[in-house]
Image (tube, rainbow, N blue to C red):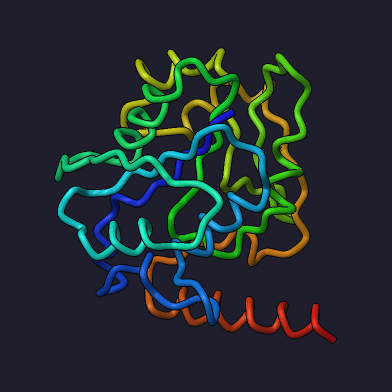
Amino acid sequence: MNALVLGAGRSQRMGTDKLLLPWTREHCVIEHILYQIGLSQCFKSVFMVTRSEVTQLHRKVSAASLPFCPKLLFNDDAHGDMLSSIRMGVKASLSASHLMVFLGDQPGISFKLIQQLCRVPEGDRQLVQPADASGRGGHPVLIPQCFFQKVLSSYEGEGLRGLFREHASSVLRIPVNDPILLADMDTPLDYQRCHERSLETHKKGEA
């Protein structure tokens, strides 16, 4: 089982590289996500798709205190959408039983949720996705190998939404009670809300 972290976006609405925003005392956003992936101990290989010119991000990832070294994949297609990055991860994971796809701007993710999503029987053909109280699905998503070729050849303009829509009967949704676990960030207000909610959750855990 492999992991893929999507980090090739240009953070245009944030106004700065959102993956480098501070999240905890020790980690920025992308470091925290990678640290949670490492804590889960679920993956044989971890890939991260980014752009080749983002040297500050590369240095941060390379210098992070992690139990693994992410393998960087470069997507410099200015017109490419998220699907083009996902396909790079799929091509690098063709021999893996599953691929879990993470968003690089979803720092509320926890290693416990990752472990929960990874608890699928060997050879299972279900698409796995966390879902909030309303049933709306989010990331990360777990894709079994039997769907890899479909991802590589289909769903232009739709991305993984098309895969999950076409194969709705194969989707297993895991209920998630805390919405911060599924929240991603596009704007400064998104970041502020997510960060404040995360700090509140952390304080409650210490109480």
Q: How many marks?
A: 0
Q: Quadrant of residue 48?
A: top left
Q: Quadrant of the N terminus?
A: top right
Residue 178 occupies quadrant: bottom right
Q: Residue at x 38, y 40 (%)?
A: 71
- Residue situated in front as seen by the camera: 45 or 81: 45
Q: Looking at the image, which residue is at 47% across and 51% down?
A: 103
> On screen, 178 above or below 202?
above
Vertical side of 203 occupied by 130: above or below: above
Quadrant housing the C terminus: bottom right
In the image, 115: left or right of 188? right
Left or right of residue 188: residue 194: right
| Horizontal arrangement in the rendering, residue 180 relative to residue 76 (left or right) | right
Give the percent coordinates (x, y) of residue 153.
Answer: 35, 15
Residue 57, picture quadrant: bottom left
Residue at 72% from the left image edge and 18% from the top image edge: 124
Q: Residue at x 64, y 27 (%)?
A: 127
The residue sitting at the right extreme is 207
Residue 193 versus residue 97 in the image, above or below: below
Query: Where residue 58 sits in the image (x, y, percent)?
Result: 28, 57
Where residue 31 sits: x, y (%)? 47, 63
Q: For this rendering, which residue is in front, 8 or 185?
A: 8
Residue 183 on image: x %, y %: 56, 62
* In front of the other: 140 or 163: 140
